[in-house]
Amino acid sequence: MADDKDTKDSKKDEVLDLLSEKPKPSRRERQRQEATKVNTVDDQKKAALDLGIEDDQPKRSTVRKTKNSGKDILPSISNRLQMKEDPDFAKVPPAEGAPAEAEVDPEGDEAEPLGENVISIKPPIIVSDLAEKMGMMAFQIMADLIKLEVFVAPTQAIEPDIAEKVCEAHGFIFEREKREKGGGVHKEEEVFVEPEPEVEAPEEQMAFRAPIITFMGHVDHGKTSLLDYIRKSRVASGEAGGITQHVGAYSVKHGERSITFLDTPGHAIFSKMRARGADVTDIVVIVVAADDGIMPQTKEAIQHAKAAGKTIIVAINKIDLPAADPMRVMTQLMEHELVPSEMGGETECIKISAQTGEGIDELLELMALQAEVLELRANPKANVRASVIEASVKAGRGSTATVIIESGTLKNGQPFICGPFAGKVKTLMDDQGNTIKEAGPSTPVEVLGFAELPNVGDSLVGMESERAAKKLSEERMDKRRKSRLVAPRKKRLEDMLQAVSGGGKAQLKLVLRTDVQGTAEAIKNAIMEIESEKVEANFIIAGAGAINESDVLMASSADAIILGFNVKVDGKAVKAAKFEGVQVKLYSIVYELIDQVRESMLGMLDPEIRETVIGRATVKQVFKVNGGRAAGCIIKSGKVSRTSHARVLRGKQPVFDGKMSTLRRHNDEVDEVKQGIECGIRLGSFNDYEEGDVIECYNLDKVSQTL
């Protein structure tokens, strides 16, 4: 019975349990409950900090103070786990590189930190650098920074006060190290320098090169005609005025060897061009006309060749003319210390004719022989160096330059530096206009790829990279700009007096455009050498290239005249010149341009007013007339004219100066009265005549000024 009762009670309890059981939550409610159980990042960090602390034990503060700073120090997690005051803490080994914890004085809260706890770093404080100093990983420092609401990458910098808080949190003392004056974190700049020219190359790398021969001499002595005969071309027939006005470089094949020829201008203004030609050449051929003899530019060419220490050969040209006198030329050469070999000297003289070809083969043989004697060699594998002999701006090509390779090999794509400008070789063209891939020593080539128009005479030097060339160009351009920022000139007393009186030099403002840069330089120098104390030329622009709209607008704003030499005017520039009223003058012969500029400078000068005394009269008696007084005079010298100016002198002091209004002889008006004759004179509104006054009559003449 008892068993049956127990069974009934158990069944009853089961039924009650089933009735009391709560219904299962829905799927959405279960998701909400699971979501609430997920710990946030802050909860996870808090749980990590509370590692090893039981819930039923009270949490104790582990913040300590140092004796030096008095600031609170929050130990790292590893240090907290090793604290001896709490035996229930889990024993976790300290992080590698973490500093040993300072012992705590039981009688006080302050502890003496060890020297290893001090972090000393210079600003800017990079997160990764700070972590390395503390012996920790960068992401650990970043976690501490997130607590401080500082979000940075490992490679970014933080403020010193933030770094100090992070160090304190890990038991370190942060000391900010001051930088020295002028110090800072700077990126170490690369220094780019121009490669030095090769002094001594290995003997096995040296190779024979073509000789560079320059024709020099007076204008119209046949230099270009001689070169035409050698090249079998007709360059001279296409030159304006029959004279060369820029440097030309050509390569000629003679037998099995190549010869590079330079043709220089002979006009007086191209002195610098001839000097450059003498500098880059190996042999100088002085061309002298047999009918003309030694002329001023011939003397100058001889001086340039001697100064450069070059071998000189004299070619006596035009021997086919009836007036030719080669013996006179040889005699004149001796006056300049050039003794012909025919007269026992060392200077070779060859009689030639550029028209008939007489003696030219002998001249070529002599040049080849001299080249062999000189043993001209260069290293084609060296860093490329070339000399700019001419530069110009060409439509569709931009800035180009004719260069002669001195050493090395210039190839397409080669970065280079030329003066202050950088560039990269885009195209190489020979003297025939053919595109080539490379050019060796002594080869004249036209180079395309300059960033700006180079200066004639500069050296083109190959660089390792385009970046190095641009950096070096920037440095040189910066120095160039700084050199122009010179101290202002102090005013002188003479300048102030000129400013007050309105004096000073008149200025002729010019815009000059030429076909090549060397010609622009020569014309500019020739105009600037025109000596004048009253007017001066001022070049707004002087360079190579066609006359464009920008030049016209520049000339309009500066009130200048545009001069073009062997160039064309763009279509837009023609319209702009008409609209702006700018004068454009085009020339093809250099001395015509120079002469017209000189005349323009003279035309800017106002004529001088000069006073010429034509007669004097003495006042004998003063008469009253209608409306004033008149002076009865006798002419003492010269004559008195009614249309002239007159002044009244009293004791050598002028008391009146003006025009003569009345000149009478008896009762008649006359135009002039000569010496010894009496007359009546009245000067304007002047009435204060006295006996003994002197009336001086004079004319004002306009006289043209000179420069």
Image (cartoon, rainbow, N blue to C red):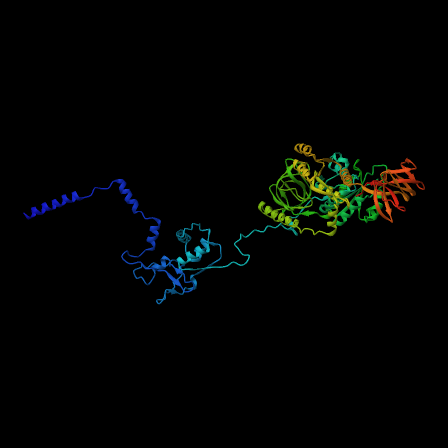
- Residue 525, image quadrant: top right
Residue 497 at x, y = what percent?
Answer: 74, 49
Residue 701 sits above or below residue 179 on the image: above
Where residue 130 sits: x, y (%)? 44, 56
Q: Is residue 527 visible?
A: yes
In the image, is 78 to the left or to the right of 649? left
Of residues 664 and 593, the one nearer the viewer is: 664
Tell me if 107 is positioned left or right of 245 in this view. left
The residue lying furthest to the bottom in this view is 107
Q: Is residue 92 left or right of residue 253?
A: left
Locate the C terminus and report the quarter of the image it occupies. Answer: top right
Q: In this view of the protein, can residue 259 be seen by the observer?
A: no
Q: Residue at x 30, y 44 (%)?
A: 35
User: Left or right of 384: which side holds 44?
Assistant: left
- Along the viewing direction, whichever of 326 and 621 lies nearer the viewer: 621
In front of the other: 522 or 351: 522
Q: Within the image, what quadrant is residue 32 found in?
A: top left
Counting from the top left corner in percent of width and height, residue 543 is at: 69, 41
Residue lying at the far right in this picture: please name it. Answer: 676
Residue 429 location (% of width, % of height) = 65, 38
